[in-house]
Image (cartoon, rainbow, N blue to C red):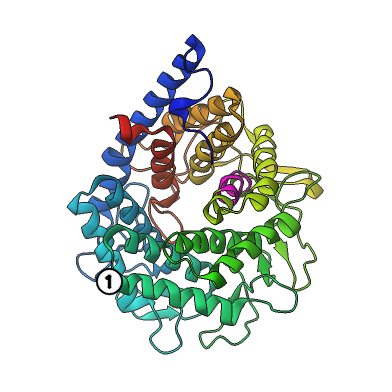
Amino acid sequence: MVTSLLNIQGDSTNSGTLMKDKLMKFAGELEQELKGNILNYWIIHSVDHKYGGFAGHITSDNHVITKAPKGSVLNSRILWTFSAAYQLYRKQEYLDIAQRACSYISDYFVDPEYGGVFWELDYSGKVLNPRKQIYALAFTMYAMTEYHRACGDDNALHTAINLYEAIEKYSLDRQANGYIEALKRNWKPIRDYRLSDKDVNVSKTMNTHLHILEAYGNLYRTWKNPELEKSLENIILLFLDKFVDHKTHHLKLFFDDDWNSKSDIISFGHNIESSWLLYEAAQILANDELLKRVTPVSVQMARECIPALDNNHGMYNEQSPSKNRIDTDKHWWHQAEAMVGFYNAYEITSDPKFAERSLNSWTFIKNYIIDRQYGEWFWKVNKKGIPDNRDEKAGFWKCPYHNGRACMEIMRRTGFRLVN
């Protein structure tokens, strides 16, 4: 296990004391951001009092699109965020939002006939897209487990276990290994696997496996099932053997059934996010041999993200080496994950340069990503730091999960809540 920053080597020296003071200030600012901006924003603006659940779309200037469709990913991410926040603060208003999310998902998104969850509903809760996107099942499992951890709801845990069993039964490729990206409502094969129009239409993606990884890890914290343990270990090994390119320590993103790579796109946000989620999963398993393999990979993945940082410390979106093109937009979630990924590398190595990278990511967020006028965070800014007001503030993908989780992770890792 990593050493607490409250006891890192060198704390007795001036440099160690200065670093600890910096990190406590860092965590304190993140707590203010979490409570005063992120969580409050979603409590005030996202609740759909007319049709139930949460608004499917909120514009950059906080105009609610009343009849926008509702996505399973947004709702499960709200559930996870407020369940985690309730565990931290025990505030009833956080539990109320989590309960609302859990009830809405259970009543409308969970498929009562075939199991799993629907991908998309209309504003009133009617099914628009019943496909079984495994990404959505994983996020719902992740969130339901967190809700159970928050308040002990056995029905939520039961839902999470059912989703795990559905993924293993219908999505696991028992010949070539890995998980099939999507299926029809009745679990039959589907032609279009894609999460979004920008994705490559292939049967296996790193992104879905990443969120199965975090979902299985969260479930294993509570449900020490031996089959789940094997499943989680298998996904970690898939990352080590298939997804991580050990020449570059970037991730390969898209594969066919037989693990032939179908894209050279480098997603910097996924690289830095995976660097800490992969390490966390190995820690959850408490498998020393596996953790020994994962640790240097995790650190090197974080190190290889440093060239993706602009001189103002913002992380670029992605790169296509074959097209000699780099997307210099800076998305909100990349910056949030950079804080945690670099901090995780600091915990492992005690290298203060990683801590400074984490702190610098927060500086960039404060300067460019936080919306001081309308609240929450901008979806993205361009290379000059200018936001695109056409991007939504809340929607199918824009949610409180990345930024909320990053705040809570840094607070937990610094021990901030233990000393304040």
Segment colored magenta? 271-279
Give the answer, above or below, for where 370 lies relative to 141: above
Give the answer, above or below, for where 140 lies relative to 59: below
Secondary structure at badge 1 equals helix
Residue corresponding to mark 1: 103
Q: Nearer the viewer, residue 388 or 226?
A: 226
Residue type of the residue flagged with mark 1: Ser
- In the picture, the quarter occupied by the C terminus is top left
Where residue 306 sits in the image (x, y, percent)? Answer: 65, 33
* Dot 1 alpha-carbon crowd within 10 angstroms: few under 14, some 14 to 19, many 20 or more: some
Looking at the image, which residue is at 34% across and 55% down?
A: 58
Where residue 269 sits in the image (x, y, percent)? Answer: 59, 46
State the predominant SS element of the stretch in magenta. helix
What number of labels is visible? 1
Where residue 193 sits in the image (x, y, percent)? Answer: 62, 73
Looking at the image, which residue is at 71% across and 47% down?
A: 250
Looking at the image, which residue is at 65% across and 80% down?
A: 191
Looking at the image, which residue is at 63% across and 76% down?
A: 172
Where residue 51 sits in the image (x, y, percent)? Answer: 24, 71
